[in-house]
Amino acid sequence: MLVFSGKEIHIDGQPTTLYHYCFEWSRETVAIALGYGSIYNHSYSPNARYDDIAQRTKIFSAIQDIQPGEEITINYNGDPEDRSPMEFDVL
């Protein structure tokens, strides 16, 4: 994880492209997962989940069989069952 100030993902108050790849890490910081973690898309019916380990690591795990070529998705709310609205339109 690369952790930095949440202010660094905005320019003139507007989100940068980097914004779309960050996880909230604390109230003032965001993080980018190294590897594929920051490019998994959101789903309310995910096939994977992530767990925070001591606010230092995210572990991604399959919660159902994922077929070759199938997109890996996670629920950005953290809990695979959480249906809280996102700040963006969910496709």
Image: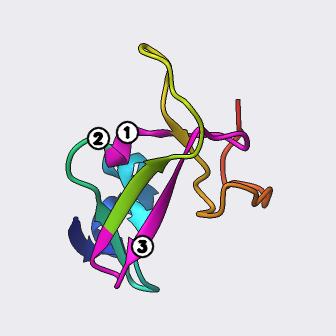
Q: Amino acid at mark 2?
A: Tyr
The local crowd at label 1, few if under 14, some if 14 to 19, many if 20 or more residues have their Cα within 10 Å, is some
Marks 1,2: beta carbons within 8 A: yes
* Quadrant (top left, top right, bottom left, bottom right) of the C terminus: top right
Choose the circle earlier in sequence order: 3 or 1: 1
Q: Position of residue 81 (x, y in %)?
A: 75, 57
Residue most extreme to the front: 65
Q: Residue at x 36, y 60 (%)?
A: 59
Q: Nearer the viewer, residue 46 or 91?
A: 46
Q: Position of residue 21 (x, y in %)?
A: 37, 49
**How far is mark 1 from mark 2, CA to CA?**
6 Å
**How far is mark 3 from mark 2, CA to CA?**
16 Å
Q: Which residue is mark 3?
A: 52
The local crowd at label 3, few if under 14, some if 14 to 19, many if 20 or more residues have their Cα within 10 Å, is few
Q: Nearer the viewer, residue 69 or 23?
A: 69
Residue 56 placement: quadrant: bottom left
Secondary element at tag 3: strand
**How far is mark 3 from mark 1, CA to CA?**
17 Å
Choose the circle earlier in sequence order: 3 or 2: 2
User: Is residue 11 at least partly visible in the picture?
Assistant: no
